[in-house]
Image (cartoon, rainbow, N blue to C red):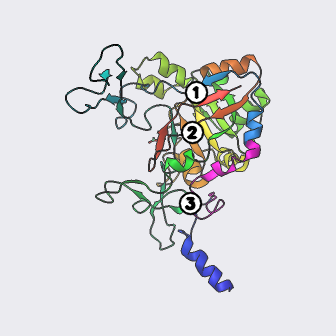
Amino acid sequence: LQLLQGMSQMTTKRWVNKPEGSNWGRFGDDDQRGKMNLLTPERRVAAAREVKEGVAFTLSLPLDYPGGNAIFAHRKAPVLQYEKRGGAAYNFNFKLSHICAEYCDIVCDDAVLLYLQYSTQWDGLSHVGQMFDADGDGVPEKVYYNGWRGGVDLVGPEDAKEGFGAHKLGVENFATAGVQGRGVLVDLNRIYGRRKAFVGYDDLMRALDAQKVGVEAGDFLCLYTGYGDLIMEMNKQPDVDVLHHSCAALDGRDTRLLQWITDTDLVAICSDSLAVEVFPPRPAEGDSFPMLPLHNHCLFKQGVHLGELWYFTELAQWLAAHDRWRFQLTAPPLRLPGAVGSPATPVAVV
Ligand code: UVW
C-alpha cells in the first residue's frame, strides 16, 4: 500500500527537485495561490478591527501614469477604443431610441488596450520564474512557483500557435482568494527622503522599531518610499534618470531580508516604487544569478505576491498624524483568466 501511495504521489507532483528556500508543496501540489492561502477568516476579522474611523484612501495612481513608455519600452499607456453599434454610428453618445421625441436615452461603451503592468499593479505568481531542473534530469527547464512549467502550463507565442496564457498561476486564482486583509505601512520616505537607498533586513527592522509596529502572518507589507509622489509630479513625462537614482527600495540580495519574508508569513509586499526591490540589484558573485532576486524569492519560491507602483502618500500622512500604521486593505486584481499581472485600485480603510 505504501508503495502504491508513493507512486500516486510521484504522478501528481511536477517536480522532484525544489529550489532551495522554496515552500513548494506547502499549500498542496496543485496550489496556485501561494501565501494568499494564509488569508483566513481570522485574519480578515483582525483586518476589519483596524477600521476605527471609516476613512478611505485610494492606493492607486491614475492608470495612465507614469505616462509614455520611457520607463519600460514594452509597456505602453492605455488606449481607449470605441466600437460602432450596428450601422455607421459609434456606440458613444449613441441614441438608443429611433424616435427621439420627449424622451431619448443615450449610451456610451468603450474598450481599452491595457498593458496589465503599466501602472499600479499586482505581479501574479506567473510573472517571474526561473530556469531550474525541477524534474531531476540534469537539464534546467522553465519553471514557475510550485513547479508549473513554461511552455506547458504557461504558453506564449513562441511555445504554440494558439491557446496562449497562464493556464496555471493566472491572476484569476489570486482574485478568487478574496484579496482583503491587514496592511502594515512602513514609511521609508520619512527616513530616506528621495535619496536612493538599498533597504536590507537591518534597515527594515529599524524602520519597524521606530514605528513600534510589527508584521505578522497574513499581513500585507506596504512600503511608502515617495517614488509615487515623484511619478505624480512628473505629470506623465517621467524623467527616467531621476527616477532611476531616487528613493528607497528593498535590497533583494540581502539573504536575511529574504529569510525574514519567508519566516513572517506575510502574504504580499506592495510598494509605490517601480519594482519593490532595487533594480538593477547589487552585483552578485558567480555568473548565474537572478536579476530580480526579490521577485525570484517572493514569486517563484514563496508564492508571495508583489504590488508595484502603488500610491500611499495621503494614507502615509494620515497614519503618521494618528501614530497608527495598520489598516484594512482591499486590493483584488482583475479576475482575468490567464493573465500574469493585473492593474489594481486598492483601498485602505482606517
Ligand atoms: C520586470 O519585468 C522588471 O518586472 P517588474 O515590473 O515586476 O519589476
Q: Residue at x 48, y 40 (%)?
A: 342
Q: Classify mark 1: helix, strand or loop.
A: loop
Which numbered marker is on residue 344? none
Indicate the amino acid at tag 3. Asn
Is residue 277 among what the camera can see?
no
Nearer the observer: mark 2 or 3; the answer is 2
Which secondary structure lies at badge 2? loop
**Which residue is outermost to the left?**
88
* Cα separation between marks 1 and 3: 30 Å
First along the sequence among labels 2 and 3: 3
Calculate the distance from the C-alpha at mark 2 to the C-alpha at mark 3: 22 Å
Q: Answer above or below: position of 93 versus 347.
A: above
Q: Which mark is residue 332?
A: 2
Q: For disc 3, does the CB lie below 8 Å from ligand 1?
A: no
Rendered image: mark on residue 59:
1
Quadrant location of the N terminus in the rendered image: bottom right
x 40%, y 31%: residue: 71
Q: Residues within 10 Å of mark 1 (few under 14, many from 20)?
A: many
Q: Which residue is mark 3?
A: 146
Q: Is residue 347 at all visible to an observer of this figure? A: yes
Q: Quadrant of residue 324?
A: top right
Circle 3 sits in a helix, a strand or a loop, which is it?
Answer: helix
Q: Position of residue 206 (x, y in %)?
A: 74, 32
Give coordinates of residue 117: x percent, y percent: 44, 37
Q: Which residues are magenta?
A: 21-43
